[in-house]
Image (spheres, helix red, strand yellow):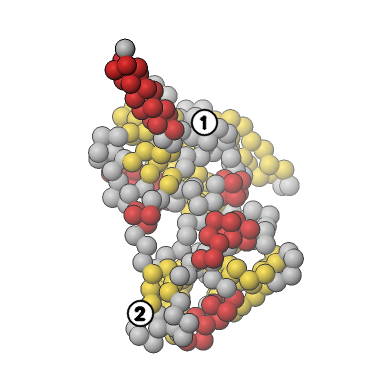
């Protein structure tokens, strides 16, 4: 009886652990983990990037899923089988389309296809979405006002391949080689990354002691020792939810407040690099320091 009870406990613990596993390792090259289920509602682009910042897939995550997995049609969508045999189900759950007519936004439900938001902007009024139906699997642009499905991802530390770059700065500060995924409000940046968000003084040190070279899609920042990082012109999300400046400018939070409703940020465009004050509801890029 004791052995039977022990086996029962082990089985229950195993089932419980499986039920709590929200993300699946599909064996993808990047190591990205995909959540097992969609979020429970349909979302506009602005709502999705605000609510799920940091876990909303970028365009390249969907492309990796499309190119490295086997897609098997099932009753309610697709069974997506990774290189390691693990799988997720992506349902064809329909969309709520929108059409702008003057000052009015008209919309309706579309069945037979399923759209999934990526966090990657297409332009100031649209973003990339991943579309699945019985006849197609592809990326395409979509206006922000549509309501689409959301499937989240998780980037394990090992998958992020974090590299901290020594730029030979007087303070000894090292800068991360890549941005965090998506845009963050000031509060979200501080809540998620705390002491790793650079201060105003650390941004000013980077400006003063490095060479900033304007390139096609951002700035290459090179230290005295020849090491460098790249700051992409990722644009920013305005407080009303609209995305601006993609490909032409970038705004990066510092952790340093400026009054009770704003904070200091690094801003750049093709005319130069500046420190400026922005209200905290702005969605900006985040580059971490160590």
Tell me the distance, in whole angstroms, between the alpha carbons under discs 1 and 2: 48 Å
Return the x and y of residue 265 as percentages of the image width and height: 61, 71
Tally of marks: 2
Residue, disc 2:
227
Which residue matches tag 1? 94
Q: Position of residue 174 (x, y in %)?
A: 43, 74
Image location of residue 147, percent across then percent down: 58, 39
Sequence-first disc among 1 and 2: 1
Dividing the image into 4 quarters, which one contains the N terminus?
A: top left
Q: Who's the residue at 25% across and 40% down the image?
A: 83
Residue drawn at x 74%, y 65% as measured from the top left: 260
User: Badge 1, how many Cα within 10 Å: few under 14, some, many 20+?
Assistant: many
Q: Residues within 10 Å of mark 2 (few under 14, many from 20)?
A: few
* 44 horizontally vs 16: left or right: right
Residue visible at 40% across and 31% down?
17
Left or right position of 98 against 167:
right
Q: Which residue sits furthest top?
A: 1
Q: Determine which quarter of the picture holds residue 33.
A: top left
From what the image shows, is residue 173 above or below residue 153? below
In the image, residue 250 sits, relative to residue 223, either above or below, namely above
Give the number of the disc on residue 115.
none
Front-most of 203 and 13?
13
Residue at 67%, 62% in the rendered image: 280
Element class at badge 1: loop
């Amino acid at each position: 009886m004791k052995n039977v009870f022990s086996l029962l406990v082990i089985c229950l613990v195993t089932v419980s652990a499986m039920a709590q596993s929200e993300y699946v390792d599909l064996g993808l090259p990047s190591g990205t983990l995909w959540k097992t289920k969609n979020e429970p509602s349909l979302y506009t682009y602005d709502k999705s990037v605000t609510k799920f910042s940091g876990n909303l897939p970028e365009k390249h995550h969907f492309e990796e899923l499309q190119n490295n997995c086997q897609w098997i049609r099932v009753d309610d969508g697709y069974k997506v089988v990774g290189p390691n045999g693990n799988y997720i189900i992506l349902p064809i759950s329909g969309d709520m389309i929108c059409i702008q007519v003057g000052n009015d936004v008209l919309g309706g439900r579309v069945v037979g296809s399923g759209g999934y938001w990526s966090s990657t902007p297409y332009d100031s009024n649209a973003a990339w979405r991943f579309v699945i139906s019985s006849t197609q699997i592809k990326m395409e642009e979509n206006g922000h006002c549509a309501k689409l499905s959301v499937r989240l991802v998780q980037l394990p530390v090992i998958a992020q391949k974090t590299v901290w770059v020594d730029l030979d700065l007087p303070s000894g500060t090292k800068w991360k080689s890549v941005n965090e995924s998506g845009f963050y409000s000031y509060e979200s940046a501080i809540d998620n990354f705390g002491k790793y968000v650079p201060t105003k003084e650390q941004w000013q040190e980077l400006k003063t002691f490095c060479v900033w070279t304007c390139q096609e899609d951002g700035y290459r920042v090179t230290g005295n020792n020849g090491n460098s990082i790249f700051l992409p012109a990722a644009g920013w999300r305005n407080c009303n939810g609209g995305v601006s400046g993609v490909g032409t400018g970038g705004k990066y939070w510092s952790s340093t407040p400026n009054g009770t409703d704003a904070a200091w940020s690094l801003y750049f465009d093709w005319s130069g690099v500046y420190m400026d004050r922005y209200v905290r509801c702005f969605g900006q890029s985040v580059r971490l320091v160590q």
